[in-house]
Image (cartoon, helix red, strand yellow):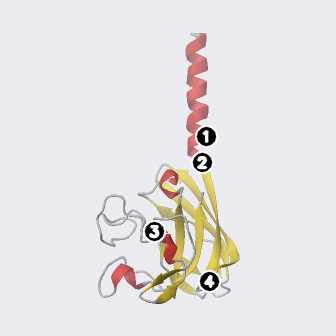
Amino acid sequence: MKKLAIVLVGLMLAAGYAAAEELVVEMHLTGPSGVGEAIGTVTASSSPYGTILTPDLSGLTQGLHGFHVHENPNCGPKEKAGEIVPALAAGGHYDPAGTRKHAGPYGDGHLGDLPAIYFDANGKATHPLLAPRIKISDLKGRSLMIHAGGDNYSDLPEKLGGGGARVACGVAE
């Protein structure tokens, strides 16, 4: 009986540890010359409902910005069609199932589709976001990306939700 109690306590502690798993990602501005200054962090915490992403960011324009997990752990620039594109080394949206569609955090498209992130009039983002389909283990070895514009979670009328340029990025290690 004593062994059973010890095993149960161990399982409860392990479950509590798993529920409390966290990953902190430092976010940086991006540009054609590379990774720029730090603008804060995004903390990913596991929950029974998915991953909670809590930003502590400043320095971007007011409004909604597209927010995604990108496939590569690299925020550097890369050349495309003869032009240097900020943070292009991060690759595309994380899509392990190969859906090739943008359907938002609750849809059946890219797993890397996250809820849009809101920056207030002071250029700060602090409101937690729920990403119901992604786990912290999915984030590790990838990049978090913030785009210049909002996100309509569709490939129409503009591809990838119309978020536009990659303005901030962080590698999840």
**Type of the residue with mark 4:** Asp
Q: Do labels 1 and 3 touch, CB within 8 Å? A: no
Q: Do labels 2 and 3 touch, CB within 8 Å? A: no
Q: CA distance from mark 1 to mark 3?
A: 25 Å
Outermost top residue? 1
Q: Residues within 10 Å of mark 4 (few under 14, many from 20)?
A: some
**Type of the residue with mark 3:** Leu
Q: Is residue 168 above or below residue 157?
A: above
Q: Residues within 10 Å of mark 2 (few under 14, many from 20)?
A: some
Residue that mark 1 sits on: 17
Earlier in the chain: of badge 2 and badge 3, it is 2
Earlier in the chain: of badge 4 and badge 3, it is 3
Earlier in the chain: of badge 4 and badge 2, it is 2
Q: Residue at x 37, y 70 (%)?
A: 104
Label 3: which secondary element:
loop
Of circles 4 and 3, which is in front?
Answer: 3
Label 2: which secondary element:
loop
Q: CA distance from mark 4 to mark 3?
A: 19 Å
Q: Residue at x 60, y 69 (%)?
A: 170
Earlier in the chain: of badge 1 and badge 3, it is 1
Q: Is residue 109 above or below residue 23?
A: below
Q: Is residue 125 visible?
A: no
Q: CA distance from mark 1 to mark 4?
A: 33 Å
Which disc, if any, is residue 120? 4
Closer to the camera in the image, 93 or 127:
93
> For residue 33, what is the image quadrant?
bottom right
Q: Residue at x 57, y 66 (%)?
A: 128
Residue that mark 3 sits on: 114
**Type of the residue with mark 2:** Glu
Label 4: which secondary element:
loop
Q: Is residue 43 visible?
A: yes
Q: Residues within 10 Å of mark 3 (few under 14, many from 20)?
A: many
